[in-house]
Amino acid sequence: MEEFLESVRLVSRELEQYWRESIASATSVVDQCPMHTIMDELNLEAHLQTGGLTANALAEFIGDYLSRSVRLHHPGSLAHQVAVPHPVAALATLVEGFTNNPMGIYEMGPSAASIEAFVIEWLLSKVGWTAAPCEATGQLYTSGAGGVLTHGGSLANLTALLAARSSFDRTVWTKGGRGDLTVITTAGCHYSIARAVGIMGIGAENLYTLPDESSGSGLAEQFERVMQDIELAGKRPFAFVANACSTATGTFDPLDQIARICHNYGLWLHVDGAHGASALLSRKHRYRLDGIEGADSLTWDAHKLMRTPGLCTALLVRNAQTLDTAFQQDASYLFHAKTQPGFDSLHRTVECTKASLGFRLFLVLAALGEKGLADYIDRQFDLTQEAYQLFCHIPGLECPVAPQSNILCFRAVEGDDQMQLSIRDRLLAEGEFHLSTAVIADRRYLRMVVTSPSTELAGLQRLAQRVLEIGRQCPGTASGGSGAS
């Protein structure tokens, strides 16, 4: 144990240096090289053969490992929807790893199970739903909302659609499907929705997508046309998936309007709020999710905008019974009548063994408080809006969509799609900025996600200037080659 405690001290020192270098932009935000180069630098084969990686040797290894890691705390970390974890919350993963309590069964992790139940009730209250209380027998009362934490939004989306299908047709679980079920979604849905319908045997051809222009006043008409197409095909629609917000652009679907339509057609409404549901914590931006209380289920990632280490996703349902009956299982060593003071959540997930996910989120809340977390979300949303206003006034840049969250797309006007990719590649090689890209209306744009608390507007202005400088040097621009395309 003394060796372990010394290792923790030394590794903590390496993490502090990594953090200080990151927030000060003292090193590259990302430093990519071939995988085998990293394997050799970390001397993996030798460590595998000799063992004994503790104390000073471990600290040196961690230092080398961190030197090749992406630095999410860096001001130029703008590529992906990954939380910059609060240091206290990162300790939760250490405690999890040491205690190793798989808490889907209450008796296997009472503390973790209790914290998850508390976190779920808190999240439900932010949606506007009242949680169904758990009895001592571990069964839920007949009314009220419920939820479970899962390892990621893709798994939560799959589970939501399984609950929707089970509510629509209980026979599918035992007899299989007839090949006539369909799911409807709006444009820009996350790829995990198509993946889920494939896993469920519904088939990608039975995923109907409303056109881009249907997000506004024409939504009802477009919805009716899609429903007519489904009826003519002899299909049975059972669920609609809305975005809050879309992955590419960070824009929100009109949930209040969609909820009314789904109610009229008797469709289960699932809201993929993996990224944008965190706006529920903000007084300033919560209106983006007006109508969310009318949904049947909601996916909400804490590991995107809630400073929580991955993975930690909530699947919330308005009626807890729909989640409790989503799966049918038989394992005599787990599922049987028992007397216990807590609730087993195992029957609500695809997973059997599950980490103490609620512990991670709770430590963020306990460190920052609700207001502190809401202030962080407001800051990132507001900074993205400021960047949008700035970029719109810089000649040579264009933004296709006004941001509604902390995601902003833009591009250098004097260049084709390939040039946008070339700009990104150059930025990655330089190491000051880490961006992603997205295709919007058949054109590729640079895409940034403003997540790091150390990102400032001045740095984003420098990014814009660098994008234009690189663009002018690229072939295919007016100053760099054969002319703009």
Image (cartoon, grey):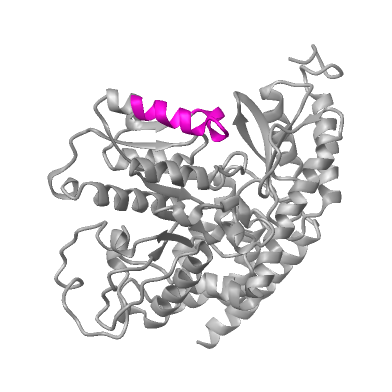
The x and y percentages for residue 296 are 39, 54
In front of the other: 188 or 71: 188
In front of the other: 449 or 67: 449
The x and y percentages for residue 75 are 76, 54
Which region of the structure is painted magenta? Answer: 211-228
The x and y percentages for residue 147 are 39, 64
Depicted 134 relative to depicted 300: above or below:
below
Depicted 301 relative to depicted 111: above or below:
above
Q: Is residue 146 visible?
A: yes
Principal SS element in the magenta part?
helix
Q: Is residue 432 visible?
A: no
Name the residue at 28% across, 37% down: 202
Residue situated furthest top in the rendering:
482
Name the residue at 50% across, 57% down: 300
Depicted 259 relative to depicted 125: above or below:
above
The x and y percentages for residue 102 are 35, 72
Name the residue at 18% across, 35% down: 178
Let me know if residue 285 is in the magenta part: no
Let me know if residue 220 is in the magenta part: yes
Q: Quadrant of the C terminus?
A: top right
